[in-house]
Image (cartoon, rainbow, N blue to C red):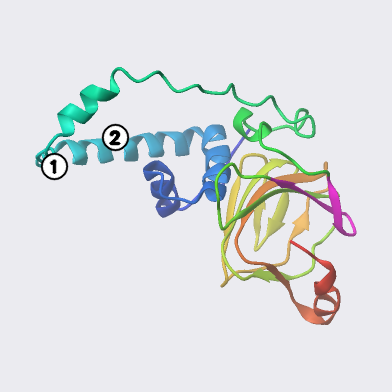
Amino acid sequence: MSITAHPAEDLLLGYAAGTLDPGEQIVLATHVLACSQCRDLVGAMEHAGGALLGELAPEAMSAGALDRITARLDEPAPVTSPPPPPSERLRELEGLPGFVRRLPAEPWRWVAPGLNIQRLKVPAQSPTRVFLLKAKPGIRLLPHGHQDAELTCVLTGSFSHDGQRYGPGDFDCGDSASEHEIAIGNEVPCISLVAMRGRLTLRGAVGRLIQPLIAI
């Protein structure tokens, strides 16, 4: 796998610090697990953050803190449930990390000619919707923009826009200033993991006509 498109450093910093919302974290983690370059950069960021914490002046403990901690030593260990098994709907899908395969998944749903969506349930409350998007080889998507941020990690196949090709493992980021006219590669269906805030907005007369039918 040759990965050429990566997240911006501010996104990777948010991932390393754990400040992204859960939906964005899922898509960033999928890319980072596939990309040695970004794993190394995230590791360096985490190391730098740990060093900065180590240089902070110590803070005095609040009154009674030690007694409260000692009292908890006799409490029974919390009962933890085993992780859920991989979703049957995601079991055979290439490029998905194990933790994503365990997310509850809806059935594939048609949204436009040659385009299907499969929504995933994020385990924590998130303003971001997470879904798989599958596009038929060789099609072109209608020109569109976004109301807010859209993070995409390609799992299989490829797509292109603005002179850049995105293949397996590649990462693409759009926002409200982005305008896309995406061409899907001819080789195999393009399946991507997407985290999106806001709604996709179609451009042009045809796009405005069918906008009410597109629920992405």
Q: Which residue is at the front of the view, 84 or 48?
A: 84
- Please name the residue shown 30% across and 17% down the image: 74
Between disc 1 and disc 2, whose residue precedes? 2
Q: Quadrant of the N terminus?
A: top right
Q: Report the magenta residues as a range.
A: 108-120
* Magenta stretch secondary structure, dominant: strand
Q: Quadrant of the C terminus?
A: bottom right
The numbered dot on residue 56 is 1
Above or below residue 174? Residue 7 is: above
Quadrant in the picture for residue 150: bottom right
Position of residue 207 measured from the top left corner of the image (x, y, whole percent): 81, 75
Badge 1: residue crowd in 10 Å (few <14, some 14–19, many ≥20): few
Q: Where does label 2 land, which residue?
A: 47
- Which element carries disc 1, helix, strand or loop? loop
Above or below residue 203? Residue 215 is: above
Instruction: Name the kind of residue labelled 1 in the image.
Output: Leu
Position of residue 209 measured from the top left corner of the image (x, y, whole percent): 85, 79
Determine if the magenta segment contains residue 110.
Answer: yes
Specify whether 20 is left or right of 187: left
Q: Which residue is at the front of the view, 124 or 92?
A: 124
- Please name the residue shown 77% across and 58% down the image: 183
